[in-house]
Image: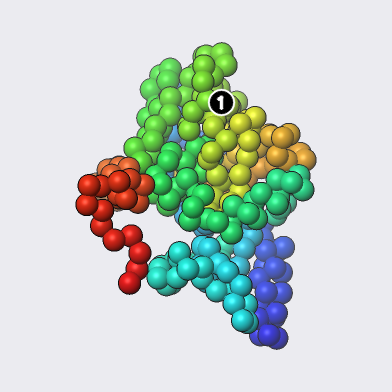
Amino acid sequence: MRPLAAALALFLALAACAAPEDAAVPVSDTWRAPRGPDGVHPDLNGIWQALNEANYNIELHMARSSLQEREGPHGPLPAPKTLYLGAVGAVPPGMGVVEGGKIPYKPEALAKKRENQANWIDRDPEVKCYLPGVPRATYMPQPFQIFQNADSIFIAYQYAGAVRDIYMEDPGPAPIDSWMGWSHGRWEGDTLVVEVTGQLDSTWFDRAGNHHSAQMKVTERYTPMGPNHLHYEATIEDPETFTEPWTLSMPLYRRMEPDVRLMEFRCVEFVEELMYGEWRRNPLPRSIP
């Protein structure tokens, strides 16, 4: 176990030395983002994507044998439901995107997080192609596109065809809770600030079972830091689940391919067999021989 302990110590040391705030340093002190369609605010138009392991776990984490594990004779092993995924179902290590390192859960909420993780394949809404919510939609491993004109902003996500209208005039409270919530935007200098409320409590932050309640308010901040990357922050307020507000942050990168575009990933049809196949007139086998 000594090599493993040494590796873990090195991993934690590197994490302690990491400086996430460096991602917020502009490409130069004199660089200024091109102006958008209104001639006043920065142009955020483009296709963007996060390049990190946040969708696996937004907190600092080591690699794991599987997204869902059980205790084995000498340590954790893949759970029966994820065993046949092999390395495809493993969790890559990640430095985390939570500022300060840990999510400030209340004790009962932390217990629920651990229970979620132990039952990942049955509980993660991503498995059944439910919309990811905010902020998770931002760091899903698929791109999204910002459409900005003089007085409105719209965000389209490749994953599940999710979309968001950013209302630049206060639309009032959400008429009903929804998967992607209710977004009200404003500009603070060159930063687009978006307050998101009215989200269902069914969405998760990641595949590690990190969760929230329907009382959650998310305040997003999109800041251009260079011609091809944005600094993204999301501050989470949810007194029902957490002891205090907390923030996650990361860079977002512009997709640069000459023919880049969003493609269709309408995964609802991909999970119909999982969710409804047992009710076919002649059901297909549902267990592995």
Image quarter of residue 264: top left
Q: Is residue 265 left or right of residue 67?
A: left
Q: Amino acid at mark 1?
A: Gly
Q: Which quadrant does the N terminus fall into? A: bottom right
Residue at the (50%, 49%) spot, across then down:
124
Residue at the (36%, 41%) spot, across then down:
160
Residue 147 in picture, x, y percent from top left: 37, 30
- Residue 47 versus residue 4: which sits nearer the camera? 4
- Residue 46 versus residue 264: which sits nearer the camera? 264
Q: Which residue is mark 1?
A: 198
Residue at the (38%, 39%) spot, across then down:
157
Residue 255 in picture, x, y percent from top left: 36, 48
Residue 132 in view, yes or no: yes
Q: Residues within 10 Å of mark 1 (few under 14, many from 20)?
A: many
Q: Is residue 204 left or right of residue 266?
A: right
Residue 207 in picture, x, y percent from top left: 52, 54
Q: Which quadrant does the C terminus fall into? A: bottom left
- Does residue 226 lie above or below 162 as drawn? below
Image quarter of residue 242: top right
Residue 221 in view, yes or no: no
Residue 249 in picture, x, y percent from top left: 60, 46
Judged from this view, the residue extending furthest toward the left is 282
Numbered circles on residues, count: 1
What colouring style does the render use?
rainbow
- Residue 164 versus residue 21: which sits nearer the camera? 164
- Does residue 155 lie above or below 246 as drawn? above
**Element type at mark 1:** loop
